[in-house]
Image (cartoon, rainbow, N blue to C red):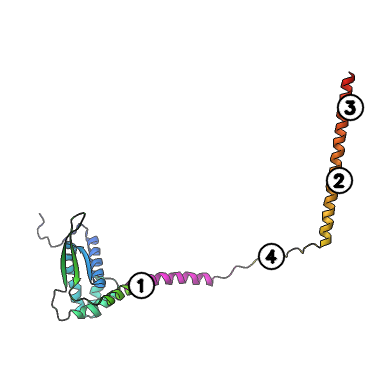
Amino acid sequence: MRHGDRVKKLGRKKEHRIALLRNQCRSLFILEKIRTTLPKAKETKKLAEHLIEFAKHNDLAARRRIYRHIQDHKLVKIICDEIGPRFSERHGGYTRIYRLGPRLGDGAEMAILELVEQSDPDTITMRRKLIERRHLVETQSKKDKKKKTKREKKPKEKKAKKKPVQAATKKEKEEKKISKKKVAKSKAKKLKKEKKAKRKIKEKKGKKKRRK
């Protein structure tokens, strides 16, 4: 039995639980509506309303308190400048929960957590693009830096190429062809003489055997 069960552990350790709630709040302030399980929605509601209460003050101390949980300067600015003033006349109850019933598969109780006063869908999409584009811009800038460093490198010294040998004249080519033909003819004559000599030697050996 756990007496004084104030903290819902959500089946996670402290560090994991805090990170989960911060991510849930981050997506809630960007999209202004999220779908999650009922226990997670109840815990994120506490943290989100706590942060909106700070955003209503909209001073440096409040921004720093919000930045502890949501470490994104652009989103902190949106919370303090857009979402906070929207609830200036309200005293609590900045979010609401809709129950959706059990989830297929594991039967977990699902719910929708949303802000009571929401902005237009166009502004929400623009906000999402503005926050998510930051990572794309950073990756592009890194690629550009790499390209610049490659361009700034000194070009390698080119080795002096050997001058191509001038093409032989037609007469030289013809002379080479004639000389090759002469060499081939002389080799053919030598082979014929060798064959004739071998035949004569064989014929003489055959005559001697017959006489015996």
Q: Is residue 73 visible?
A: no
Disc 3 and disc 2: Cα gap in Å?
28 Å
Q: Which of marks 2 and 1 is nearer the N terminus?
A: 1
Residue pointed to by mark 1: 134
Task: Tell me the mark number nearer the camera, choosing from 3 and 1.
Answer: 3
Residue 70 found in image quarter: bottom left
Relative placement, left or right, of 160 versus 198 is: left
Residue 204's disc is 3
Give the quarter of the figure containing the C terminus.
Answer: top right
Residue 204 found in image quarter: top right
Q: Residue at x 17, y 68 (%)?
A: 45
Task: Tell me the mark number nearer the camera, choosing from 4 and 3.
Answer: 3
Disc 4 and disc 1: Cα gap in Å?
50 Å
Task: Tell me the mark number nearer the camera, choosing from 2 and 1.
Answer: 2
Disc 2 and disc 1: Cα gap in Å?
85 Å
Residue pointed to by mark 4: 161
Give the quarter of the figure containing the N terminus.
Answer: bottom left
Relative placement, left or right, of 171 versus 4 is: right
Q: Which of marks 3 and 2 is nearer the N terminus?
A: 2
Residue type pointed to by label 4 = Lys
Labels 3 & 1 near each other (Cβ < 8 A): no
Category of crowding for the residue at label 2, using alpha-carbon neighbours closer than 10 angstroms: few (below 14), some (14–19), many (at least 20):
few
Residue 186's disc is 2
Q: Which of marks 4 and 1 is nearer the N terminus?
A: 1
Disc 4 and disc 3: Cα gap in Å?
66 Å
Category of crowding for the residue at label 3, using alpha-carbon neighbours closer than 10 angstroms: few (below 14), some (14–19), many (at least 20):
few
Q: Which of marks 2 and 4 is nearer the N terminus?
A: 4
Q: Residue at x 18, y 64 (%)?
A: 111
Relative placement, left or right, of 168 versus 204 is: left
